[in-house]
Amino acid sequence: MNVYEAINSRFSGRAFLDKPVDLEAVKRMLLAGGRAPSGTNTQPWKVHVLTGQALKAFCDTVVQHRRDKGAEEDPQYQYYPKKWREPYNSRRKDVGWALYSALGIERGQHEKMATQHERNFRFFDAPVGLIFTIDDDMELGSWLDYGMFMQSIMLAARGERLHTCPQAAWIYHQGIVRRALKLPDEQKVVCGMAIGYLDEDDPSSSFRTPRMELDEFCTFLDDQVPDE
Ligand SMILES: Cc1cc2nc3c(=O)[nH]c(=O)nc-3n(C[C@H](O)[C@H](O)[C@H](O)COP(=O)(O)O)c2cc1C
């Protein structure tokens, strides 16, 4: 698979087959991720790889905790803006409704929405779940590095004919995630990721998200000399 094929065929998969992923393939993907650049080669990433009984026990613990406690917890970092504004608010809402619509969930069907959201905490039934953490004294630049690391894993997954879903959902249950993984105090939960073979027959698997046109996010400075 060439690089553009890998990039363009990546999307967030939200339904995975009950088909194991070879641990050697997971290791190849993680090593490929580790080839990501990072400022002064700091490599700030730490990955907790969950498979088999460990994955099941972890998901059971978090799902049960959510059912018992209900409310989400404060994450250890602010992912989204505190106050939404345009154009981001519309994009956020559009993608949410489009996904629900693909799944046949209509406005007002809160129980179905909650059930769909809960699937996050089973890694959408993927056989591999990753939880990413970072030392809490690392700064914003290292989080930039982290995104590159995660994207490299997702592209390597395409090379293995696998699909992925990056999942910030886990950060809203960081307390139980930390306890279940016995994370040291100085590590923050950054994100999760589901990895597996896509269930092509699930309605969520045909869901695709739109992107901006080039002229909406690029300014080409060629012969124009910017004013002083
Ligand atoms: C860091 C990060 C966290 C995300 N968290 C979630 C999540 O918790 N659950 C989910 O279903 N999708 C999650 N997504 C997927 C986004 O909704 C998705 O990337 C976006 O809508 C674009 O769609 P695409 O990935 O299919 O191209 C996340 C994406 C990123 C990059």
Image (cartoon, rainbow, N blue to C red):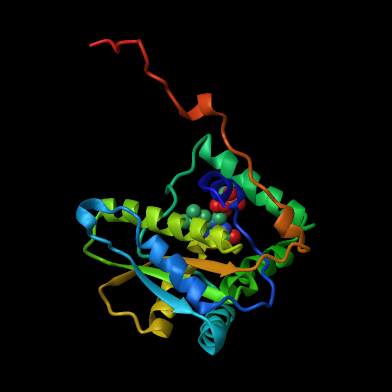
Residue 163 percent coordinates (x, y): 60, 62
Q: How many marks?
A: 0
Query: Is 95 situated left or right of 130 in this image?
Result: right
Q: Is residue 146 visible?
A: yes
Residue drawn at the location 35% of the way across and 65% of the way down: 76
Ligand 1 shown in quarter = bottom right
Q: Is residue 107 visible?
A: no
Up/down of 127 relative to 188, above or below:
below
Q: Quadrant of residue 66?
A: bottom right
Choose between 113 and 212: the one closer to the eye: 212
Up/down of 158 relative to 15, above or below:
above
Outermost residue, front side: 1
Residue drawn at the location 67% of the way across and 69% of the way down: 16
Residue 5 percent coordinates (x, y): 58, 47
Query: Is 100 situated left or right of 177 in this image?
Result: right
Residue drawn at the location 58% of the way across and 71% of the way down: 123
Residue 106 percent coordinates (x, y): 77, 54
Residue 17 percent coordinates (x, y): 69, 72
Quadrant where the C terminus is found in the figure: top left
Residue drawn at the location 28% of the way across and 80% of the way down: 184
